[in-house]
Image (cartoon, grey):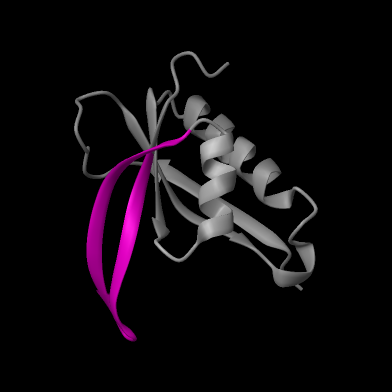
Amino acid sequence: QLEGLIAVRSAKEKLGSDAAQAEIIAWYVGETARGHNLGRKLLVHGITVAKRLQCDEAVLWLPLTAHRAHRVAVAAGFSLAFSRETNAAEGVVKECGLYLELTDYF
């Protein structure tokens, strides 16, 4: 059973800057693992991967309905910076883009 995952890559499209950006493309915590700080631990691991990719910034897209994930990301230092709408099988998905400056992270 999958409890959680995080996936990070160098950003293909840079948003708002010419600095090297990482994009957190997947961040998932299973229902049974929620409430045990796994999401925070995975996010910190993703930020570490972004640093290892020698990126100066990280971008994370979350659905507007992902309130718990948004709180965890803001607590980790991310701030709201972008918004977008994407088409999915279930219709239009509204997302917020969160940004983290990595040069001073660690």
Q: What is the magenta segment's predominant secondary structure?
A: strand
Looking at the image, residue 39 lies above or below residue 87: above
Q: Is residue 27 visible?
A: no
Residue visible at 57% across and 52% down in the picture: 6
Query: What are the residue bounds of the magenta stretch?
Result: 78-98
Whether the magenta-drawn stretch holds residue 7 is answered as: no
At which x and y percent is residue 2? 71, 69
- The answer to which image quadrant residue 63 occupies is bottom left
Looking at the image, residue 60 lies above or below residue 77: below
At which x and y percent is residue 5? 62, 57
Looking at the figure, which quarter contains the N terminus?
bottom right
Whether the magenta-drawn stretch holds residue 96 is answered as: yes
At which x and y percent is residue 39? 66, 50
Residue visible at 44% across and 15% down in the picture: 103
Residue visible at 47% across and 45% down in the picture: 8
Looking at the image, residue 1 lies above or below residue 84: below
Looking at the image, residue 36 lies above or below residue 64: above
Q: Is residue 74 visible?
A: yes
- The answer to which image quadrant residue 69 occupies is bottom right
Image check: 91 left or right of 77? left
Image label count? 0
Looking at the figure, which quarter contains the C terminus?
top right
Furthest-bottom residue in this view: 90
Q: Nearer the viewer, residue 44 or 65?
A: 65
Image check: 31 left or right of 87? right
At which x and y percent is residue 46? 56, 40
